[in-house]
Every structure is written in C-alpha cells, then in structure tokens.
Amino acid sequence: MRCFYRSAISFAILLAAISSIASPALSADKRSEDKRPNIVFMFSDDHAPHAIGAYDGWLKSVNPTPNIDKLAKQGMLFKNSFCTNSICGPSRAVIQTGKHSHLNGFMHNGNNFNGDQQTFPKLLQKAGYETAMIGKWHLKSDPQGFDYWHVLPGQGAYYNPFFKTPQGRVKIEGHCTDIVTDLALDWLKEKRNKDVPFMLMCQHKAPHRTWMPAERHLTLYDDIDLPEPATLFDDYKDNASPARWQELEIDRHMHLIMDTKMTAPKDFDPKKAGSDRSGYMNLQQMTPKQLAAWNAAYGPKNDAFLKSPPTGKDLVRWKYQRYAKDYLRCVKGVDDSVGTIMKYLKDAGLEDNTIVMYSSDQGFFIGDHGWYDKRWMYDESMKMPLIIKWPGVTKPGSVNEKLVQNLDYAETFLNIAGAPIPADMQGSSLVPLLKGQSPKVWRDALYYHYYEFPSVHMVARHYGIRSEDFKLIRFYQFGEWEFYDLVNDPDELTNEYNNPEYASVIKQMKVDLAKLKDHYQDDTDVNEMPKEWQQKFRVKK
Ligand code: SGN
Ligand code: CA
C-alpha cells in the first residue's frame, strides 16, 4: 500500500495553492457576465447505490431509476464513493463543513449542529452565489448560509409534512417528495435572484424508514417478485460479536405493522409496539382520499397474508419483499423528482450551465446480511451514490473509480465556484476528476468512524480503514477486529482477521489506521469498555 496519508496532505496543500490563485474577486456582475455554473445538488436519504440502475447490483433488473440513470449517461458516475460516518445528521454535517464528525461536532444524530461554524454554503454566498436549501436537513439548529430555506423539522413526515421556514412553520398537503420538488421548482422559477449563479440543495426524505410511497406508486412492483440479496440469511458467524447482537434484522426487528404495513388488529396499541411510531402515526395525518388509496393498495395484500401467514424463513422472505418494494417505490418518487428538475432546467435554458449532482447521505442494507438501516462500515452502508453532470466538463457516461468521500463535496463546490478553499477543510476537490484528469496524488485509503452507541439499532461504535482492496474494522469498545479481502470477498462474509496469510497486510493497515486517525486529528477515545459492560451488550436479544 502506498503512503496515503502523506498523499492526502500534499494533495491538500497543492489544491489550496491552486485555488488561491484561481479565486476571483467578489463580483456584483450581472448573470450574463458571470459564467460560473449553477449547482443543483439533489440528495436523498438512505438511497443505496445498489438501488440505482446505473450502479451494479442485484436490483438492477427492475430498472428502479430511469432518470438517475439518464443523469449518469450524461455525466460521471463515481463507483467508489463513501461516507465517513454512515448516519444521517453526521453525513450532512460532513458535507456542510468538509470536516470529519469529530471536528464539526455532529458525531451522532443526537447532536445539535453548531451553525456558526464555517460551511460551504456561507462561503458560496461570499463568492457571490445565491443559495437555497429545501427538504430534509436533520441538523437540529436552523440552517445558516442560505438565502432561502424550507426544511423538514427532524425526520419530517411522508404525508402532509410540516416545514420550518425563517417565517415559521407551514404544513403542506401532499407527498413529501413531490412537495420538495415543487418547492425547488418554485424557487428556481420565481424566487431566486436571476442575476447571480445559484446553488440549490434539493433534499428528499425518501427512501428513509418507514418507506411510505406516494399514492401513484403504492402498487408498483405488485406484479413481480424482487430478486433476493445473496446474503439475506447471513448467520454472522465470522463477524466480531456486534453483528450478532445488533437490532436491525428483517427477521427479528422489522415490525410487521409499523414497518411492513400489516393491517393492525382492533386492540393494537402502537405505544406498546416497542418501535418508532412516526410512520404509523403519519397514517392518522392523511386526508381521507390518501388513506383510502393506502387501504385500497395494502388491504387486499394484507388479507392474503393474514389468511395463511408465512412462518420462519418464508416470513423473512415475505417481509423482505414488502420492505424492498416499498423502499423502491419511494426511490421511484425520488427518481421522478430528478426527471422533473432536469426537464425544467432544459426547458428554462439553464441546462448548459448547470451542474446536476445526485447523492444520498449513506448507503443502506436492502436485506443484505438480513438487515435494513445503515451505520456499519460494511460496503452496502458505507457506500454513497455520487453522479455529477457538468456540461462541457464531465465526459458523458464516464465512470470514475477513485476513492472519494462526502468529505470532498464542500471543497468541490468551492472549487467549482472559483472560491478559496479554507486550509482547515479535510477533503479534496473532485474538480480534477470531473475534468477527466488522473491526479498523480490521490488518497489510497479512507478513514471511517461511527459513534452512535448505545442507540436505536444497537450498532457498536467502530472505526476503520478501507483501501481499494482491504478493509480493517475495530469495534474498540469490545476490543474486537474484523478484516476483509474485498477483491476475493466483496460481500464481506469471511472475516480474515485471524488468517495468518493476511498477517503482514493487517499489521501494515493497523499502522496506517493510526496514521489516518492522527492525520485527521481524531483524538476521540477508542478504548475498550470494562469487560463486565461488554458482556451486558453481547447478549442476543
Ligand atoms: C429513526 C428510524 C431508524 C433510523 C434512525 C436514524 N426509525 O429512528 O430506523 O435508523 O431514524 O435514521 S423510524 O421508525 O422513525 O423510521 S437517520 O437517517 O435519520 O440517520
Ligand atoms: Ca440517512
């Protein structure tokens, strides 16, 4: 392995030097004289790359995302795109700041983002861009650095959601994905200052749990069986202990009524269901028409289930089908939104000078390893989709295989705008890659750190390093390691940590992990918990 941490440092210095030469003076020029591109940053929640047709995966055959695929055909698809911490708020905070979680202060969803700190939207504004943020924000504090914002409070609701705005809260009728699209279009058409370039963040709640599709998609895929992931019945026998006592299995933790929309019996008390109630409670907020469409779609399918309920593995398979179909139905709504926005840009004559980017806050398990949710450093969850179309710059249909992260977005946006890149940002601008260049110096390993434990889904804290070929994970509270050979075992089923054949690679990766931790100035505690505490968690519930 090359010395990636040194590469990362020298690359950052190089970029800072280039960007300070390239940065223009702030200008109040009219739009016709300012040729800098607009940026439409479309972002969804929990949309795994393997639920996008343009990426490879076992769901490709159902053609889940025709519009996102079209974007990929017109732009560049990043095959090896990852997050630094696979969870919603933290991923967004990394994007805002270009800094790892331990530095931006938003390490887990319970945190409150310090919006007074340096963020890329503020710097874009300073460089003369108009900025807007619409949809899921999830950083608790109010957005800063935006000329216009309409954000969902917390997770937001799928049906008839409230939005927070600088003027107060508003409730809007409809499905969240469509409302966010409409608000984005309204801002593009009516509200923005047309004399300056813009950056619009159009951020969807879908396809987040509890996967509630729009009315028009409620029966999509009813006529087919989805392919199953190869690892649906993983037994975790090779993993470190946390994989055996987590709480995100389709089998044991996915709730039949709350998650898979089974008809509730008359005496059902959601408070006793022991699961998050927000999605189920959203049914009470539907209009009579929405609820009628919902019941008409799920009712007959639920009746068929209740007539002869499957058990054992058949029940897992049934839940997987119901869950994955709802997930893909929500994805379809997001894909429609991408199509609508792209059509508007074309019709309005904005297409040629607007960068369109699609991404999601992390990946997701769609039954892979028998799971839903994210959080783990395993590839299904650590990978993020990333597709960028920059007319005249990205080669249509190109695929980039470099290791990139959400840590890079802030610097990329600033670089595109010709704005200076602050030296304390920790990523690397993707602009050279977008231009089709192959920089001599680029990172050859990624640093990852997940902190939310104990918490919903009970995924133990871990940190680790991922190179192109190998992955080393440390569940430090429990003093356990995992190591995977990603070339020979892309599904990460065989933990090779104790295989002597890998001893020298593992030794080197431990050294490199320590260096990366140091390089990114992560001085958070990675010590083991006392043995008696470890034992309490290790019990499979
Ligand atoms: C909610 C979800 C969890 C999810 C977290 C974090 N339950 O608690 O499944 O892991 O959010 O998700 S739900 O029943 O309300 O959907 S995140 O994307 O915001 O990080
Ligand atoms: Ca998420």
Image (spheres, rainbow, N blue to C red):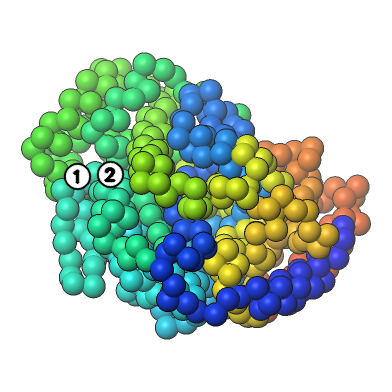
For residue 357, side relative to residue 180 (left or right): right
For residue 221, side relative to residue 490 (left or right): left
Q: Which residue is mark 2?
A: 178
Q: CA distance from mark 2 to mark 1?
A: 7 Å
Residue drawn at x 87%, y 57% is 1
To which quarter of the image does residue 311 belong? top left
Q: Nearer the viewer, residue 341 or 392?
A: 392
Q: Residue furthest bottom?
A: 116
Look at the picture and state if 72 lies above or below 152.
above
Residue drawn at x 35%, y 51% is 205
To which quarter of the image does residue 446 belong? bottom right
Residue 174 is tagged as: 1
Residue drawn at x 76%, y 61% is 443
CB atoms at circles 2 and 1 under 8 Å apart?
yes
Q: Is mark 2 within 8 Å of ligand 2?
A: no
Q: Residues within 10 Å of mark 2 (few under 14, many from 20)?
A: some
Look at the picture and state if 516 lies above or below 49.
below
**Is there any visible trace of residue 230 in the rendered image?**
yes
Q: Please, what is the three-letter code of the amino acid marked with disc 2? A: Asp
**Is there any visible trace of residue 366 in the rendered image?**
no
Percent coordinates x, y for residue 482 in the rendering: 72, 53
Percent coordinates x, y for residue 53 in the rendering: 53, 32
Look at the picture and state if 177 lies above or below 51.
below
Q: Nearer the viewer, residue 246 or 361?
A: 361
Q: Please, what is the three-letter code of the amino acid marked with disc 1? A: Gly
Residue drawn at x 33%, y 35% is 260
Q: Residues within 10 Å of mark 1 (few under 14, many from 20)?
A: some
The secondary structure type at the circle numbered 2 is helix
